[in-house]
């Protein structure tokens, strides 16, 4: 496996694992507090919709001319990568709360408790919540798999990495039967954000007609550069927060 294929598989695996963890938290919360059958039905319906979207988008991407494909893929990956990296930088700097699956699980359970209890038949609330969670998280997975796979002409490798990530999360979640709060989700998002930005920049520039020194061999250097810039932004954001933080109140005076 080449360095580019390894980077592709790792990026897709981590990205899909993060999305799977977030979707699993919502489905587990609904299944454990309302009708599990309705939660599974909503999950199944969302997966069917994602399969249709994959079948529709896949040929449309692969039929594009190579330069247009790289430009489209690069743009999509930059959209996702910059969004993920911005949030990861803010969380690492302390400007945004860390993603907490246990807190999200508790919030979903509390919200479900406020709804009328499910009656006979389909629980519409549970179905809708699980459908929405899986569809939204899964759509990002579909886009990432197709963009990586189509550009590298190896959709099978991207799909295998995505399937491995989902199965790993599902197996771990079913084993512990609890929110996967110990998964280093924020660190994974930082890494994925860096990787998506690197691939998006690389392929987008190629699609626009530019050429990189050494071709794909320049990808590790691009990843390292973006990671260093991101870490520098974390330090800058931390310093900015410290500069505007209120000074501690003086200790009360004692004695005469």
Image (cartoon, rainbow, N blue to C red):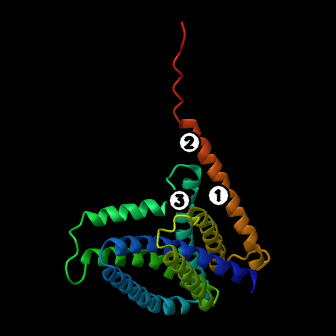
- Residue at x 78% of width, y 77% of height: 217
Residue 128: mark = none
User: Dot 2 corresponds to which residue?
Assistant: 241
- Residue at x 41% of width, y 65% of height: 105
- Residue at x 54% of width, y 65% of height: 84
State how far apart marks 1 and 3 are (Cα): 11 Å
- Position of 222 with respect to 191 (left or right) is right
Disc 2 crowd, CA 10 A, few/some/many (<14, 14-19, 20+): some
Q: Position of residue 97 (x, y in %)?
A: 49, 53
Going from the N terminus, do you reach mark 2 or mark 3 first? Answer: 3
Determine contact: label 2, label 3, CB under 8 Å: no
State how far apart marks 1 and 2 are (Cα): 16 Å
In which quadrant of the rendered view does residue 154 lie? bottom right
Q: Is residue 61 above or below residue 112?
A: below
Q: Position of residue 137 (x, y in %)?
A: 45, 75
Determine contact: label 1, label 2, CB under 8 Å: no
**Rendered-image quadrant of the C terminus:** top right
User: Dot 1 corresponds to which residue?
Assistant: 230
Label 3: which secondary element: helix
The residue furthest top is 256
In which quadrant of the rendered view does residue 115 lie? bottom left
User: Dot 3 corresponds to which residue?
Assistant: 87
Q: Is residue 40 above or below residue 191?
A: below
**Rendered-image quadrant of the N terminus:** bottom right
């Amino acid at each position: 496996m080449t360095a580019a294929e390894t980077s592709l598989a790792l990026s897709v695996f981590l990205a899909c694992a993060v999305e799977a963890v977030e979707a699993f938290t919502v489905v587990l919360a609904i299944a454990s507090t309302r009708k599990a059958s309705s939660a599974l039905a909503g999950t199944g319906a969302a997966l069917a919709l994602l399969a249709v979207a994959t079948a529709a988008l896949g040929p449309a991407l692969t039929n594009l001319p190579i330069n247009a494909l790289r430009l489209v893929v690069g743009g999509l990956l930059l959209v996702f990568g910059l969004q993920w990296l911005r949030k990861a930088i803010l969380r690492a700097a302390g400007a945004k709360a860390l993603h907490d699956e246990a807190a999200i699980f508790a919030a979903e359970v509390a919200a479900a408790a406020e709804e009328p209890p499910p009656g006979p038949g389909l629980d519409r609330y549970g179905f809708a919540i699980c459908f929405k969670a899986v569809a939204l998280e899964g759509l990002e997975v579909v886009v990432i798999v197709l963009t990586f796979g189509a550009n590298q002409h190896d959709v099978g490798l991207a799909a295998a990495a995505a399937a491995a990530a989902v199965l790993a999360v599902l197996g771990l979640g079913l084993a512990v039967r609890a929110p996967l709060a110990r998964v280093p989700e924020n660190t994974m998002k930082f890494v994925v954000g860096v990787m998506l930005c690197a691939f998006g920049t690389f392929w987008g520039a190629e699609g626009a007609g530019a050429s990189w020194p050494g071709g794909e061999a320049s990808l590790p250097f691009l990843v390292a550069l973006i990671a260093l810039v991101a870490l520098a932004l974390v330090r800058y954001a931390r310093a900015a927060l410290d500069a505007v933080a209120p000074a501690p109140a003086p200790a009360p005076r004692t004695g005469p």
